[in-house]
Each structure stands twice: as C-alpha cells, then as structure tokens.
Amino acid sequence: MKQGHCTLVGAGPGDPELLTLKALRAIEAASLLLVDDLVSDEIVALAPPGARVVRVGKRGGCKSTPQAFIERLMVSAAQDGERVVRLKGGDPFIFGRGGEEAEHLRAAGVTVDVVNGITAGLAGPTALGVALTHRDHAQGVVFITGHNRPGSDPADWRQLAATAHQARLTLVIYMGMASAQRLQQDLLAGLPAHTQVAIVQNASRPDQRHAVTTLGRLHDTIVGHGLASPSVIVVGDVVSGIAALPADSGQMPDTPIAPQARSA
Ligand code: SAH
C-alpha cells in the first residue's frame, strides 16, 4: 500500500484569532487544502500562495461535494506525496464527519494527524458570556445534533429533557434550527417552559447575532428574529449568566437581536 499523510485541522468557529498555533502551522505548510463550507475566507487566505485550495462545501448554492469524492481525493493526494490539510469548521471530531474521514484515511494506509479546533458549541455561548457549566446552574453539558442521520433512530428528546432537568445538564444543540419547533415540543416534556435558551448564529464572526429567550418561546423567537443556520441553541439556566452582557443585549426573556459587542 502507498504511504501518505493527511492532517485534519479544526478551523474553529470563524474568527481567525481562534485558530490554534498548530492549526496555523499546518495550514501554512499545506500543498493541498480541502476546505469545508463553514471555514471563513480569512482562514483560507492563510494558505501559502502555491497551495491548491478546493472548497468542498455547499457555498454559493452548489450541492455539497459527495463525501466519497472528498475521501478519495484526500487519499490519492496524500499518496502522491502532497501535504494534505483537511480544514473543517470548529473541531474536526465534533460532528462534521471528521471521525469517518480519519477512519477512511487510515484504512487506505494514510497516516492521520488531528488538530483540535474550538467547536461552535463552546464559542457561541462564550461569545455571550455564558459559562456552560456554571456550578450554580449545571453539573455538565451535552453536545447534541438536532439533525437526524437518515435511517438512524432519532434521539429521545423527551427523555433527554427529563435527564437534563434532573441532573442539571446544559444542552448545546448543533444543526437544530430546521427542527427547532419539534425539539421545543419534545424538550417541554421534561424541562419547564421558563428554562432559559440562547440562540447564537455565526458565532465569532463579524455577522454574529443572537437572541435570548425561554424554551416556551424558542420557535417563535427564531422565526420572529429571522435567525438561521449556522447557529447553536443553548438550553439551560446557565444562559441567565448573559445578564453580564451590555444592556442592549442582556434583557430577558426575549431580547432583540444584538450584534456582538465589537460591531455594536
Ligand atoms: N465541527 C463543527 C460542527 C459541524 S456541524 C464544530 O465543531 O463547530 C455544523 C453545525 O455547527 C451548524 O449547523 C451549527 O449548528 C454549528 N456551527 C458551526 N459554526 C458555527 C458558528 N460560527 N456559529 C454558530 N453555530 C455554528
């Protein structure tokens, strides 16, 4: 089997300042970068002038590149001796198929390094001043996807809500915007309607927006404020820590959309 090497790099939530030094060094040393949708242009611009950059996301309304094609390209380029960097939004191993890609590469005899990135589920709440495990409110945190893989059993959100209530867990929901209405209904089976919720769109980017509301008003707030993907939804009373934000964005239970502090 031909050798080869590939580095899966977490690009973080968008702000280039949130890249790790290791990620920056890997990008700067790459000869081929395969770049996901959610990676910001400023980060792609850090690639060396001679490097080939292949965007493999859905940007510009194109259909996303089939996963099998991406994996084949990574393997063949690595085996041809290219310095392949697979640049993924957030952390490569939090959703977004990094695990599958690493398995595929290893099965093809390609060695793999993984560089962590700051996942959106951390960056979003932090941008609002929300401490996910503030001990007055939470004993733990659950990162969960609201998008069900076709053919697999959906999570039992009612059970999850009851557990989160009993064990005081904060829920951080990725890919939950399209199904927010159903998630709200199910979560209300185990969590009170007054449970605090924050929605953070484009966390760490210049166009970051957020709203703070309650579980009982989640869907109405999303629709009313026109919030959309990519967003994380944070459910739990740790969100009350948002009162630490400037007055224009800290009112509850249903704050107007506020841009992040630096563009306010
Ligand atoms: N690996 C990524 C997640 C990929 S799944 C990570 O660790 O962050 C894609 C989902 O991540 C989006 O639907 C959204 O829920 C979330 N997401 C990614 N970037 C985001 C951002 N800048 N702001 C808010 N949510 C984001």
Image (cartoon, rainbow, N blue to C red):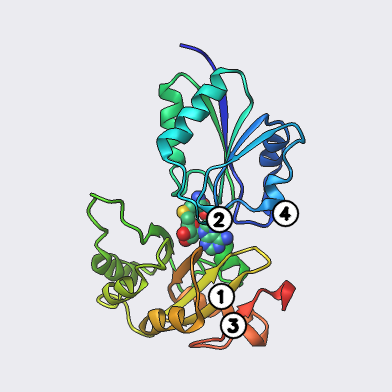
Q: CA distance from mark 1 to mark 4?
A: 21 Å
Dot in front, 3 or 2: 2
Q: Amino acid at mark 2?
A: Gly
Mark 2 or mark 1: which comes first in sequence? 2
| Residue that label 2 marks | 60
Q: Does residue 259 appear in this view?
A: yes
Decide if residue 190 is on the left or right side of residue 248.
left
Residues at marks 3 and 2, CA–CA distance in whole angstroms: 37 Å
Q: Amino acid at mark 4?
A: Glu
Dot 4, crowdedness within 10 Å: few (<14), some or many (≥20)?
Answer: few
Label 1 vs 3, first from the N-terminus: 1
Dots 1, 4 in contact, CB < 8 A: no
Instruction: Estimate how packed mark 3 is, as few (under 14), some (14 to 19) or many (20 or more) residues with alpha carbons within 10 Å.
Output: some
Q: Residue at x 52, y 88 (%)?
A: 252
> What residue is rendered at 52% in x and 48% in y?
57
Does the beta carbon of the residue at mark 2 sit less than 8 Å from ligand 1?
no
Q: Is residue 191 above or below residue 94?
A: below
Q: Which residue is mark 4?
A: 17
Q: Quadrant of residue 175?
A: bottom left
Quarter of the image for residue 5 reads: top right
Earlier-in-chain disc, 2 versus 4: 4
Q: How far apart, in angstroms, are the residues tagged by discs 1 and 3? A: 14 Å
Of the numbered discs 3 and 2, the one sitting upstream in the chain is 2
**Residue identified by numbered label 3:** 243
Q: CA distance from mark 2 to mark 1?
A: 24 Å
Q: Which residue is mark 1?
A: 210
Q: Of circles 1 and 3, which is in front?
A: 1
* Alpha-carbon span between mark 4 and mark 3: 26 Å
For label 4, being within 8 Å of ligand 1 is answered: no
Kindly report the distance in space between the C-alpha atoms of the residues bearing marks 2 and 4: 25 Å
